[in-house]
Image: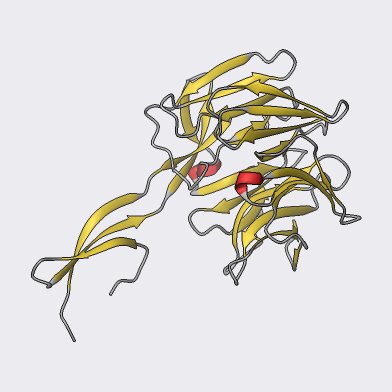
Amino acid sequence: MTAGPLSFFSPQPSVDGKRIFAIAVQLRAELVRYDAKSAQFVPYLGGSSITHVSFSRDGQWVTYLLYPEREVWRSRVDGTERLQLTRAPLDAWAPTFSSDGRQILFNAFGAGGGQGMYLVSTDGGSIQPLALAGAQGEWCNRGNSIVLMGGPMQNSRVHLFDTRTSKTTVIQGSDGLRQARCSPDGRYIAAVTQDGKKLRLYEFDTGNWSDLSTSDIGFPQWSVDSKYIYFDTGSSKDLAIFRVRIADRKLERWTDLQNFRRVVDPWVSWMGLTPDGSPLLMRDTGSQEIYALDFETP
């Protein structure tokens, strides 16, 4: 009965049975960067409809997902030399560069619906699945490691996976933590408690965890110099972006999000960070309307 760019939900028949009412949604977004000088969100990378933006260590390349297609692409930071790296039926998210910039790790649901992690060259080509069924993660700058979480969400733990030896090591004291992210200097892991109320920090040198923030935590991101962690407050009443300094745990409110029309994802809405420390968000430019579809019985 329907075809095209609109997705239809919640169909309901009319009383006389001659119409079907349904909600039609067209998913679309504009990538924006928070400009601290003007205190405004401005288009970034041409305001393209993309998400899960991640930068190479030298700051010259960027990888991202098209939204809502969820295909992995890469390009230079000025948008040139674009290359598509994945296609359907892979449903991808969270692509990140290896430390040498030669590979991109991404998470995806495959053709059979199973969740896993994959590697692809930044120049394109064959996609290599990692033998870690059900795991998700991103590159960690400690050798050739990937920081990941495995097991059910209510009992998640933080692990390190060595891509050279295929050995997995559990980070002690990480029970119930999610959204694990390694610092760019390889000294720390930041992770969020299951209830989203604490941001915790693991130091490799001491093997200890400590609390960085006890406010509502949405999507955390490290600064390039590893001195700060930025995070939004998720779906709490106080919508905002904060950053916390690692050295002294000082918490700063970066900007409010009360009047920002944000794309809301399942579980946790994405937030990114540019190499110069500017937060990236997806501004919702899609549509949601109710349609009446005429219906005639065969």
**In this rendering, is residue 36 above or below 220?**
above
| Closer to the camera in the image, 175 or 30 | 175
**In this rendering, is residue 298 above or below 100?**
below
140 relative to 244 in the view: left or right: right
Which quarter of the picture shows residue 12?
bottom left
Which quarter of the picture shows residue 181?
top right
| Closer to the camera in the image, 95 or 206 | 206
- Point out the residue furthest to the left here: 16
Residue 83 visible in rendering: no
Percent from the top left, x then y, of residue 49?
48, 49
| Closer to the camera in the image, 201 or 28 | 201
Q: Residue at x 78, y 63 (%)?
A: 131
Which quarter of the picture shows residue 203?
top right
Could you tell me which quadrant the N terminus lies in?
A: bottom left
265 relative to 105 in the view: left or right: left
| Closer to the camera in the image, 207 or 147 | 207
Q: Residue at x 58, y 36 (%)?
A: 219
257 relative to 45 in the view: left or right: left
**In this rendering, is residue 194 above or below 104?**
above
Percent from the top left, x then y, of residue 74?
66, 53
**In this rendering, is residue 65 above or below 55?**
below
Percent from the top left, x then y, of residue 20?
19, 67
- Point out the residue furthest to the bottom here: 298
Number of numbered discs: 0
Percent from the top left, x then y, of residue 279?
57, 31
What's the coloring here? secondary structure
Residue 106 visible in rendering: yes
Q: Residue at x 66, y 39 (%)?
A: 176
Could you tell me which quadrant the C terminus lies in?
A: bottom left
